[in-house]
Amino acid sequence: MAVVVFLIVRGLGGSGGSSGSSDPVQPEVLVSRLAPKQLPAPISGEAAVILHGGTLIIGGLDAGEASVSGVFRLDRTGKLRPAGSLSGPLHDAAATTLGDKVLVLGGGTATSTDTVQALPVSAAAGRSATASVVGHLPAVRSDLSAVTIGPKAYVLGGYDGTTPDPAVLATADGSSFEQVAELKVPARYLATAVVGARIFAFGGETAGGAATNAIQEINPAQGTTRVIGRLPRAVSHAAAVVLGGYIYVLGGEANGTATDRVWQFDPATGKVAAAPSLPLAISGGAAVGAGQTAYLLGGTGAGGEALASIVLLRLQAKPAPSSASTTGSEAANASGDNAPPFEGKLMIADRGNNRIIVVNNRKRVLWRYPSKAHPAPPGGFYFPDDAFFIHGGAGIISNEEQNERIVQLSYPGGKLLWSYGHPGQAGSEAGYLHEPDDAYLWKNGNVSVADAQNCRVLIVSPQKKVLREFGDPAECTHDPPRRLASPNGDTPLANGDILISEVSGSYIDEITRTGKLVWSLQLPISYPSDPQQLGPDLYLVADYSNPGGLYEFTRSGRIVWSYHPEAGNGRLNHPSLAERLPSGDIAANDDYRNRVVIIDPKTKKVVWQYGVTGHAGRGPDHLHIPDGFDLLSPEGMTPTHLYTG
């Protein structure tokens, strides 16, 4: 479904505009939340403008993906009232104010149009009006953007039915147009904003259908366009607002799925930084701004469904205090440091609850799987032993250990992309697994997995062909790579090798993907689980026992750091995975104390945790035998396993 994004900015001193200062004040944080009142019905592909009397929502697609002709006024109390109509059903149009008119440009239904319509600005004050046709664009164009600077409106981006249109057009009346510039990267579904006399365009969908990460600056007065930077990730269908002298790029579509990411762009320096995420993934929302407040209206969600959401965005001088409370004697931040131990999203494979959840550092649940919106695939979703982000955060890979299957899911859409194994059926022949553990996606698309009860590690192609098999299901002994003694870890390394843990005998091995043993080490612990490489000769492993421990070691077997309290809040009961976070802290599953903990390696104190110690549950801040986790940074990176796909 085609969806278009709009930001209507009225230039210097106008609604949602900035002062054009070259030294904007740095806001400490952008806070976004769902408004108390939502739209009465879902809408996507709509245009929107904000005026003194309220916000006009113009055309769009309804929940059944039918174009609509209605114009509605959203007042400051959140009430939506009819304000008129277009000359006919329309979506994917652009809208902007020009003098005493609201121009509605292009768009279409089954095909694109060149029509320019006008509504009186009095429609925002409650005077119903029907739009009149006042002109025509030089060519048909949909999926476009429009902004106003001073006495002229400008049209940029969009699609003529075949290719993106590179022409940047100017009009003083909506009836006659002149080309004033040309985009360096022609695209539709741009996110656009105005600062001073410059137009900024972010991302968009190019001729081949792929998104771009280009940041383009258009100076209509000089007739110039240039690429001045790049977003960290390619995105289309995003929105943009100007707050505090910065432009915030909101949501959009990345790798075909709606995202909740927000990027902050400094027009003075050209720098891009991650900002706090939206409360939900939104693609194609219509964004409007006034002063220090902005709204993101409707759009489509992670599953492609039209949304009835209104997201309220404001600048907040200081981060709000965490609402997370401690339970029992443990402290959520025992170090006393208010700085969160991680930024981004923490995914938890909540094995005992047969689910995956994603939380932020303030313990808010951002996503659940399975859910009503994201149902389980055929064969159910059972016993997720591990889960890792893939494709830069656009997907998830998880091994359902006792469901005998590996699945790849879209994120946040929750759609099944790929699977290997047969749900509920164990085996060792081609296509079967027996308690798969630690499934990883490699950059070449292959998947490695420790097939624990078959005493082997497999490398499987996207076509589900076994390319490599290390170990022998008929003989579970330590003789790598020909035989392996119950492997449960197969971590990809930067050099392309695989780091394998063997439970029986407590061995760690490094094996090349062609099957050559690089080194092998027997550790003095009970049950090595999921080893990770920290440096050229430094590794981290969890001891899956009670009390359990975490150990950093070298290839020579020297233990250089350990954590293994035998009592108290710090005691671990069968930790299955430990990883070093970008902060330097160590995160670990504390499986049978029903929590994920983050530990300061210097003080050896728990500084953050999700889950109530020793209490299983499904509600907020509760887990049941969490057996895996992964971190997705605000930049869309997986910092604990950078070498995976």
Image (cartoon, helix red, strand yellow):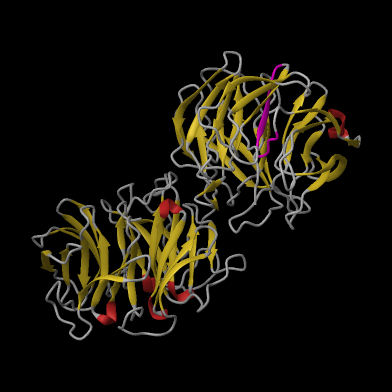
In the image, residue 158 sits, relative to residue 480, either above or below, namely above
**Left or right: 532 as drawn, with respect to 140:** left
Whether residue 44 is visible to the viewer of this picture, yes or no, is yes
Q: Toward which corner of the image does residue 134 lie, by quadrant?
A: top right
Question: Residue at horizontal 54%, vertical 72%?
Answer: 376
Can you give x and y, in whole percent of width and height, for residue 527 in the image?
22, 74
Can you give x and y, in whole percent of width and height, for residue 163 in the image?
58, 38
Question: Residue at horizontal 47%, vertical 42%?
Answer: 234
**Left or right: 529 as drawn, with respect to 635:** left
Extent of the magenta region: 140-150
In the image, residue 88 sits, relative to residue 280, either above or below, namely above
Q: Decide which of 626, 202 is in the foreground and name it.
A: 202
Can you give x and y, in whole percent of width and height, for residue 532 in the image?
25, 59
Q: Decide which of 599, 292 is in the foreground and name it.
A: 292
Q: Toward which corner of the image does residue 434 lie, by quadrant?
A: bottom left
**Left or right: 117 as drawn, with respect to 600:** right
Count of marks placed on residues = 0
Question: Residue at horizontal 56%, vertical 24%?
Answer: 182
Q: Toward which corner of the image does residue 77 lie, by quadrant?
A: top right
**Left or right: 606 as drawn, with respect to 22:** left
Q: Decide which of 8, 554 is in the foreground and name it.
A: 8
Q: Could you tell me which quadrant the C terminus lies in?
A: bottom left
Whether residue 565 is visible to the viewer of this picture, yes or no, is no
In the image, residue 559 sits, relative to residue 419, either above or below, namely above
Q: Decide which of 617, 49 is in the foreground and name it.
A: 49
Q: Is residue 122 magenta?
A: no
| Residue that protrudes farthest toward the top in the picture | 222
Can you give x and y, in whole percent of width and height, for residue 38 in the image?
74, 50
